[in-house]
Image: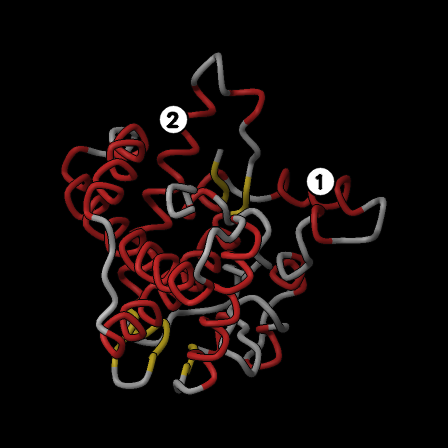
C-alpha cells in the first residue's frame, strides 16, 4: 500500500545523462498549469543520495546498498513528483478522502529515512514526502471503493494503475526534454540526447539499468560504467 517507500524505489528508472547538459530554468515539468520545479527534483535527489550514503556506511546495510548514478535517481524523482501532482489534481477533482491515522503511521515509518539527511533539510523533505504519500493513499482508497467488497492488494493496485492512467490521459503533462520523456510524459523513456548534443560518455548513462535489461552482460557493463563516474555523480 502507500507505506512502500516510493522515493527509494527508483533503481528501475531509466537514466538521464548529467554530462553535457544543462537545466532549463526551474521547470522540470508542467502538469496542466502546475509547475514541477527542478529545484524540488534536485532537492529530493540530494536527500536520496544522503540516505543511500548513510546506508552504505552502516555495517548492517552497506553490502546490500546498491551504488546508483545520481542521474538515475533524478529521473526517478521527476516521475515521482509528476505522479504526486497528478494524484493531487485527481483527489481535488473528486474530493477524495484518506485515513489520517494511516498517513501518520506511514510517516512514522519514514522518519528513519528523514533522520538520515541533514537536519536543516528534514522539514522540507518530510513535507514533500508526506504530499507524495497522501496522494497515493487518496487514490488507493478511491480504488478500493470503486472495486467494493474485499479486493486483493493486487486487484487494488491494478485499479489504481487504471485510474491513474485514465486521469493522466486527460491532463497535459509537459516534461523538460532533458529528462527524456515519452509521449505520455514518463521521464527516462527515450534518449534525451536526441534533443541536444551530449558527449559519448553521457550517452552511456542513457542505457537501461541492469534489472530492466535482457542482456546478460548489462550488469557488468553498468557496474563498470558506474566505476568511471566521479564521486559526485553517484550515490551509495
- Specify how the rendered protein is coloured: secondary structure
Helix, strand or loop for disc 2: helix
Q: Residue furthest front?
A: 149
Residue at image coords 17%, 33%: 119
Location of residue 232 in the rendering, given as x and y in whole percent from the top left corner = 44, 42
Q: Could you say which disc has been placed on residue 54 in the image?
A: 2
* Residue to which mark 1 is pinned: 224
Location of residue 137 in the rendering, given as x and y in whole percent from the top left corner = 33, 54
Residue at image coords 38%, 68%: 82
Local packing at callout 1 (Cα closer than 10 Å; few below 14, some 14-19, many 20+) is few
Label located before the other in sequence (1 or 2): 2
Q: Could you say which disc has been placed on residue 22 in the image?
A: none
Q: Residue furthest right?
A: 216
Q: Quadrant of residue 135?
A: bottom left
Alpha-carbon span between mark 1 and mark 2? 23 Å
- Please name whichever residue, 102 or 66, is drawn nearer the observer in this view of the structure: 102
Location of residue 191 in the rendering, given as x and y in whole percent from the top left corner = 63, 72
Residue at image coords 55%, 42%: 68
- Please name whichever residue, 81 or 100, is drawn nearer the observer in this view of the structure: 100
User: Seen in the image, is 138 located left or right of residue 206?
Assistant: left
- Please name whichever residue, 35 or 137, is drawn nearer the observer in this view of the structure: 137
Q: Quadrant of residue 17?
A: bottom right
Helix, strand or loop for disc 1: helix
Height in image: 79 above or below 32?
A: above
Height in image: 165 above or below 115?
A: below
Height in image: 14 above or below 21?
A: above
Residue at image coords 53%, 53%: 72
Amino acid at each position: 500500500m502507500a507505506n512502500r517507500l516510493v522515493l527509494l524505489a527508483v533503481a528501475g528508472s531509466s537514466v538521464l545523462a548529467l554530462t553535457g547538459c544543462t537545466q532549463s530554468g526551474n521547470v522540470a515539468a508542467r502538469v496542466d498549469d502546475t509547475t514541477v520545479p527542478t529545484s524540488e527534483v534536485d532537492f529530493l535527489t540530494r536527500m536520496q543520495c544522503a540516505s543511500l550514503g548513510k546506508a552504505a556506511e552502516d555495517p548492517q546495510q552497506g553490502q546490500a546498498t546498491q551504488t546508483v548514478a545520481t542521474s538515475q535517481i533524478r529521473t526517478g524523482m521527476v516521475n515521482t513528483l509528476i505522479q504526486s501532482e497528478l494524484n493531487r489534481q485527481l483527489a481535488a477533482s473528486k474530493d477524495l478522502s484518506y485515513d489520517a491515522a494511516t498517513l501518520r503511521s506511514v510517516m512514522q515509518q519514514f522518519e528513519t529515512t528523514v533522520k538520515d539527511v541533514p537536519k536543516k533539510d528534514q522539514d522540507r523533505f518530510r513535507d514533500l514526502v508526506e504530499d507524495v504519500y497522501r496522494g497515493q493513499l487518496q487514490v488507493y482508497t478511491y480504488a478500493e471503493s470503486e472495486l467494493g467488497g474485499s479486493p486483493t492488494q493486487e486487484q487494488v493496485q491494478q485499479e489504481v494503475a487504471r485510474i491513474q492512467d485514465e486521469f493522466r490521459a486527460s491532463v497535459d503533462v509537459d516534461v523538460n526534454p532533458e529528462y527524456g520523456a515519452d509521449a505520455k510524459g514518463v521521464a527516462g523513456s527515450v534518449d534525451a540526447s536526441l534533443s541536444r548534443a551530449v558527449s559519448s560518455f553521457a550517452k552511456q548513462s542513457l542505457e537501461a539499468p541492469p534489472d530492466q535489461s535482457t542482456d546478460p552482460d548489462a550488469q557488468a557493463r553498468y557496474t563498470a560504467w558506474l566505476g568511471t563516474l566521479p564521486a559526485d555523480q553517484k550515490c551509495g
